[in-house]
Structures are given as structure tokens and as C-alpha cells.
Image (cartoon, helix red, strand yellow):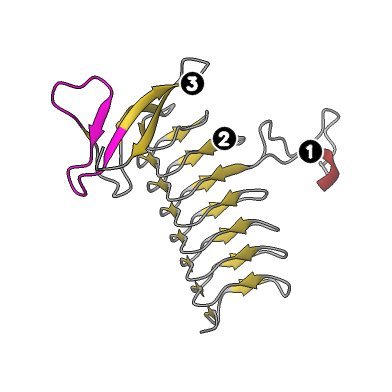
């Protein structure tokens, strides 16, 4: 099954689209971009030059994915989400002359496997959104988001954990570091890395 590009979409000649991928009306996929299998690029969305997108990714209507973003398998980028690429944006140099393409260093957003970005959320590069994390609608992400974290607000702050199903996890009765998904019954456990950051690890449901 080949990819489908709607008549009003703009797709660069050297773009690689995986089998089953659909690019909808008025979307633009720039030169050198590569999208995996069964992706959906919604109406009016933008995928920047040389951006890498994995399999089964949804980029919803009017989302802006600026290079050099990297999007892993199964990620969800909601309507009107923006992934920036310039930490100190200016259209002119200090002397007032226009900036040329060589006048800045692009920085990217990395979206890891299964992560979801809610509608109109903003990721200020450089940041990484961890595996299966959930960014709430309208949140502004200015620092890395851990795996399975649920973040909300401006700036985005972790308020809980979510599992692979996207449902907020519930603390196990009597436990201080264990959480369970109410939908799948999968069990997760908190751990601390060397910096004291709290992380969540999925463990075998038989444990």
C-alpha cells in the first residue's frame, strides 16, 4: 500500500513517505523529510526540512513541526501544536540587517515513542518529551519531560503519571512508589536517578 498525498498538499520531491501514510489538504512536507508507515499529516500541518518521523505518528491539523525535530513511533502531535527550533529568535542582526540562513543555529525538539502533545501546546527547543508522556493542551514545555509524566501549565509542570493507555495512573494502596493503570492494570514503579529526579518504570504485571 503506497502513501496518499491529497491534491492541494505540498510535498518535496525527495521526501520519503512510508506505506499507508496520508498527507491531507494544504499540508506542507519540506524537502528531505522522512515519514514512516501509516502516518497521518492533517490539514494545514507543516513538517520542516529533513525532519524524521517514525511509524504510526499523527500530526494533527495546523501543527508546526520545525526542523530539526525528531518524532518517534506512535507519537501524537495535536492540533496547532508548535515545536520551535530557535532558542533566541531574531529576524535581523544587531545592526538591523536581515538574518540569512547561516546566521543562526537551529535546535530541535525530540518526541520519544508513544508521547502525546495536546492541542495548542508549545515545546520550546531544545527539549525532549519522554516515552509515553502526556503534555496537556495549552501547556508550554521549557524543560525535558520524563517518561510517562503528565505535565500541565505554563511553564509545564509534572502533576502525575500516565500509562501507555494515556490514562492517569492510580497509586497502589499502601505503596509509596507503585502506580497502576486503571484501564490495563499495568504496574509502574517510581525510581530516582543519580540527580534525584523521579522517574517512572513500567514493570511486569505479574510482579
Segment colored magenta: 171-188
Specify whether residue 116 is painted magenta. no
Which of marks 3 and 1 precedes in the sequence? 1
In the rendered view, does 186 fall on the left or right side of 107? left
**Residue situated in front as seen by the camera: 11 or 22:** 22
Q: Which residue is mark 2?
A: 127
Estimate the x, y position of residue 148 in percent, counting from the top left.
38, 38
How far apart, in angstroms, are the residues tagged by discs 1 and 3?
34 Å
Neighbourhood count class around disc 2 (C-alpha, 10 Å): few under 14, some 14–19, many 20 upward: many
Estimate the x, y position of residue 182 in percent, counting from the top left.
17, 43
Q: Is residue 124 visible?
A: no
Which label sits in the foreground, 2 or 1? 2
Q: Which residue is mark 1?
A: 104
Q: Which residue is mark 3?
A: 193
Choose top left, top right, bottom left or bottom right for residue 36.
bottom right
Specify whether residue 180 is painted magenta. yes
Amino acid at each position: 500500500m503506497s502513501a496518499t498525498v491529497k491534491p492541494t498538499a505540498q510535498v518535496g520531491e525527495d521526501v520519503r513517505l512510508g506505506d499507508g501514510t496520508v498527507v491531507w489538504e494544504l499540508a506542507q512536507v519540506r524537502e528531505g523529510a522522512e515519514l514512516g508507515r501509516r502516518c497521518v499529516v492533517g490539514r494545514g500541518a507543516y513538517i520542516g526540512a529533513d525532519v524524521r518521523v517514525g511509524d504510526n505518528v499523527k500530526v494533527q491539523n495546523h501543527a508546526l513541526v520545525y526542523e530539526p525535530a525528531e518524532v518517534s513511533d506512535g507519537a501524537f502531535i495535536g492540533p496547532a501544536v508548535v515545536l520551535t527550533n530557535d532558542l533566541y529568535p531574531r529576524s535581523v542582526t544587531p545592526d538591523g540587517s536581515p538574518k540569512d540562513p547561516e546566521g543562526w543555529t537551529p535546535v530541535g525538539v525530540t518526541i520519544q515513542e508513544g508521547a502525546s502533545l495536546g492541542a495548542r501546546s508549545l515545546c520550546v527547543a531544545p527539549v525532549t518529551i519522554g516515552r509515553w508522556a502526556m503534555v496537556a493542551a495549552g501547556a508550554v514545555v521549557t524543560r525535558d519531560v520524563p517518561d510517562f509524566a503528565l505535565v500541565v501549565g505554563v511553564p509545564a509542570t509534572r502533576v502525575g503519571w500516565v500509562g501507555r493507555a494515556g490514562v492517569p495512573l492510580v497509586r497502589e494502596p499502601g505503596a509509596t512508589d507503585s502506580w497502576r493503570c486503571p484501564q490495563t492494570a499495568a504496574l509502574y514503579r517510581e525510581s530516582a536517578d543519580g540527580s534525584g529526579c523521579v522517574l517512572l518504570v513500567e514493570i511486569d504485571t505479574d510482579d
